[in-house]
Amino acid sequence: MRQKIVKTLLVFALAAALVATGCIGGGTPTQTQTETGTSPTETATAPKHKVLVIGYTRDPDTLDPQKSTWVDITTSLVFATLINIGTDGKIIPGLAESWEISEDGKVITFHLRKGIKDALGNPITAEDVKFVFDRLMNPETRSPMAPLVLGPLKEVKVIDDYTVQLIYEEPYGPALPFLATMPPVGIFSKEFYEKVGPVQFGQTPAGTGPYYVVKWVRGAYIEYKRNPYWKREYRPDPALKNPGPPYIETIRFRIIKEPFTLVSEFKKGNIHVLLDVPPEFYKELANDPNVEMIPALEYVLHYIGFNCQKYPFNDTRVRQAINMAINREEIIKYALEGLAVPVHGPLVPSMNGYSEKMEEYAKQKYPYDPEKAKQLLAEAGWVDRDGDGILEDKNGNKFIVEMWISTGELEAPKVAQIIQAQLAKIGIKVKIRTVEESSFTDLVSKGLHQMYLLRYGLQDAQILLYMFHSKKGVKRMFFYRKDLDEALDKMGTTVDPQERQRYIEEAEKILIDGAPMVPLYARKVFLAYRKDVVEGIVINPYTLDVYLDDAKLK
């Protein structure tokens, strides 16, 4: 579960440093630093294990959630939000105890709890909330997720120490869900940030979440300590019982990119939690009596993306032909052990706004049909002129393209090889290039690629604006259309669910017809943990957040 247990979206490169916590903010929090001065009770007897070790396949670019292109559990542990989505799917309080929306939908007023402190003891007031949002809105922050998370947010206004208003240019349909789930709007202390500066903040951040980072050794591990000031009321979920702070004092994310090594360490007991079980090891771990598996369908779409401004993918017919040449079932069977569902449209079933009608439309428009794919390529001028099995254009240029895959995508090599074989059947030769995760999205955003294999995800259809809007989105496929921008804009400003759904489907149809990508699948994902080491891990089925508040070591 990629963050959530992947928040999916979408990764990468600062040097590691250890925060000199004794000189920062409220001083060094220790196990006995709580609001009452007492130590949290962990178990009736001292646990054998002292550190919860979580296997992690990524080496982030930064732990600053406002700057990263990928936010997941490594940041959500650190930053609490004003509101939350509970395990029952309802929006519940967070750092804000209550809120109201104006009649015109343009102003959301939050009333903060009194006495909130960050992990280092710095008090949190409305001024800190304003600072967080102002920084996210500031173009100099260059937050890749700001347009998606903030939408048409115009101003943040402090009413008093515990009241703050978010003022929008126009109503924003997904405002509350995003404010409840996205780490870029997680709250931290202005004083702490200004003291350590942006670089150290991105390396060893401390916020209002249940844990904070004390050390990050790039390529090796990220270590967290519990926030002694964390309270259950900051996330009053019905599934959580611990009043706070967390029972487990130290969490360490071990960075291991190779799946065999990752699982081997888990089986030996050197790693206690796998956030995302590699498909090839599912059966083995599911039969292990010491392992508990928690399933979910990720709200992440795995896809092939094209650079629609670069030859030969600037021709819609070429992109459509490749859509008909991909056998999703074969990919799922041989690369994913059957642990995925095929997807033909731009949204997956677990996303808010998903439409069965548009999924069926995409499926009918692009059936798996290699012969039709060849015909469409021939119409576009691509034929095998010399009989070597590779298509050529009218100028004799062979259809040889490069497909990029990221080192952070564990199943990507297998998936890419199957795609390579499938496209070879219609005369397209694909060369697979592996790119370091730390530079992947930067290179793609510069348009240096021809095609690539990646994924995107979010709980809401607003992800389409993030991925495809010409001015408000990231640069990935360079597929820009005025009518698409208009549909995405209306989707984002419409509060009525039925009316908003019409704009979602309008945008979907434009994307399906234009084929800037080949949707592939959504994975059935599994978190695994060792029952002989830890208990009490909770997964939110609506957000896929991993909650460690109630977790205890044995």
Image: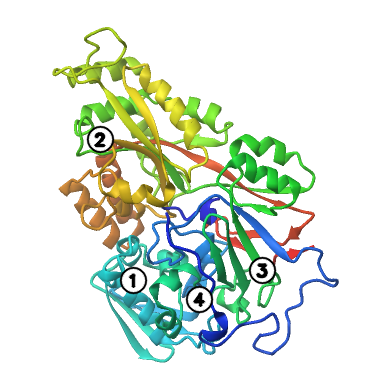
Q: Which mark is residue 250?
A: 3
| Residue in the foreground of this view, choosing between 116 and 192 | 192
**Label 1: element kind:** helix
Residue marked by disc 1: 136
**What's the amino acid at mark 2?**
Asp
Residue drawn at x 28%, y 74% as measured from the top left: 106
In the displayed structure, 433 sits above or below 389; it is below
**What's the amino acid at mark 1?**
Leu
Distance, label 1 to label 3, CA atoms, is 29 Å
Q: Are marks 4 and 3 in contact (CB under 8 Å)?
A: no
In the displayed structure, 310 sits above or below 141; it is above
Disc 4 crowd, CA 10 A, few/some/many (<14, 14-19, 20+): many
Distance, label 1 to label 4, CA atoms, is 15 Å
Q: Residue 59: x percent and y percent?
A: 49, 54
Residue marked by disc 2: 513
Q: Which mark is residue 207?
A: 4
Distance, label 1 to label 2, CA atoms, is 34 Å
